[in-house]
Image (cartoon, rainbow, N blue to C red):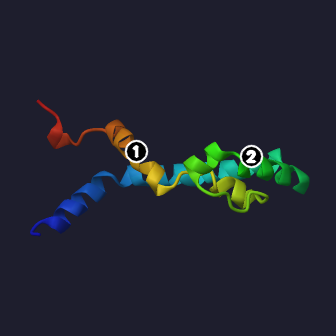
Amino acid sequence: MTGTWLLLRTFLRRDRWQFLCWSLGGALLYWSQAYSVDGLYTTQADFDRAAATMESNLAFIAMIGPARALNTIGGQVTWPSPTPSRWAWASPCAGGCSPAPPWWRRR
């Protein structure tokens, strides 16, 4: 376990801008979804119609899980949103986009 904190500190210093960008990007994603849903469904009847359609779609339920509170803005935003299990497959893709550390590059 010698050097664990040094290694952790080194990687956190290197990736601090990526953490900031991913966090702000995630927050912007949720805000934009809420803004879009608020403009898309103007009445409660529209929300109820959309909720009934999504709750009966077996493909959605198989991929995302059981629907909850789809007749609200929060339910429309959080139910289809990415969960940690769905981020697991995207992590290698995101890591492949990050620049290599200076000590990794060949001279």
Percent of width and height locating residue 73: 75, 57
Residue wearing tag 1: 89
Picture residue at 29% right of the left edge, 57% below the top: 13
Q: Is residue 43 visible?
A: no
Label 1: how many Cα within 10 Å (few below 14, some 14–19, many 20+): few
Instruction: Give 70 or 106, whichever is nearer the viewer.
Output: 70
Percent of width and height locating residue 61: 62, 50
Picture residue at 17% right of the left edge, 35% below the top: 105
Q: Could you say whether the residue bearing mark 2 is in a helix, strand or loop?
A: helix
Point out the image quarter for the N terminus: bottom left
Judge left or right: residue 45 versus residue 105: right
Residue 11 figure quarter: bottom left
Label 2: how many Cα within 10 Å (few below 14, some 14–19, many 20+): few
Q: Amino acid at mark 2?
A: Ser
Picture residue at 79% right of the left edge, 58% below the top: 71
Instruction: Give 92 or 69, whichever is nearer the viewer.
Output: 69
Judge left or right: residue 97 versus residue 80: left
For residue 36, which numbered disc appears in the image? 2
The earlier-in-sequence mark between 1 and 2 is 2
Total labels: the figure holds 2
User: Compared with residue 13, is residue 60 higher up or lower down, i.e. above or below?
Assistant: above
Point out the image quarter for the C terminus: top left
